[in-house]
Amino acid sequence: MLWPSLLLGTLLEVVGDVFFKKHWLWWGMFFYTTGTFFWAYSLRFGELSKLIVIFSVLNLVLAVIAGIFIFGETLTWIQWVGIALGTVSVTLLSL
């Protein structure tokens, strides 16, 4: 149950971020709060010191994807390198 709850919690929080950016406060609060419950539930199955990094980087990557595809944002090459390094960190922590 670790990965499903962690991924769902992350995804719901990013959906909440998208709604906040669109100024839909109540929907944003709903998705963000629901995501927080899934995140808290995932803590039952792993170590906080590892899960917080995985959650943070997944949140970052999903938020970047949302920013690019929903809001038309762009990234510099150094920002792409940062995302790649974050993804490597999640991979290493997952081993």
Image (tube, rainbow, N blue to C red):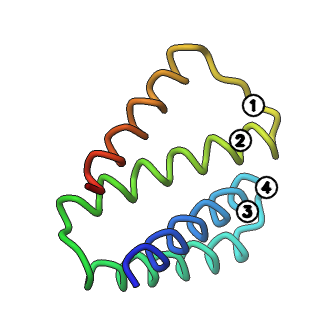
Q: CA distance from mark 3 to mark 2?
A: 12 Å
Residue linked to disc 3: 19
Residue located at (80% from left, 41% from top): 71
Q: Position of residue 94 (x, y in %)?
A: 30, 56
Specify the amino acid type for callout 4. Answer: Lys
Q: Which is more N-terminal, label 1 or label 2?
A: 2
Residue located at (35% from left, 48% from top): 90
Q: Position of residue 11 (x, y in %)?
A: 59, 66
Q: Disc 4 on helix, strand or loop?
A: loop
Q: Disc 1 on helix, strand or loop?
A: loop
Specify the amino acid type for callout 3. Answer: Phe
Q: Nearer the viewer, mark 3 or mark 1?
A: 1
Q: CA distance from mark 1 to mark 4?
A: 14 Å
Residue located at (48% from left, 32% from top): 83
Q: CA distance from mark 2 to mark 4?
A: 12 Å
- Categorize mark 4 by other alpha carbons within 10 Å: few (<14), some (14-19), many (20+): few
Q: Which is more N-terminal, label 1 or label 3?
A: 3
Numbered label attached to residue 29? none
Q: Which is more N-terminal, label 2 or label 3?
A: 3
Residue 55 left/right relative to 67: left
Quadrant including the C terminus: bottom left
Residue linked to disc 1: 73
The image shows residue 89, relative to residue 77, as above or below, that is: below
In this view, the residue in front, 28 or 68, is 68
CB contact under 8 Å: marks 2 and 1:
yes
Specify the amino acid type for callout 2. Answer: Gly
Specify the amino acid type for callout 1. Answer: Glu
Q: Disc 2 on helix, strand or loop?
A: helix
CB contact under 8 Å: marks 3 and 4:
yes
Q: Disc 3 on helix, strand or loop?
A: helix
Numbered label attached to residue 67? 2
Numbered label attached to residue 22? 4
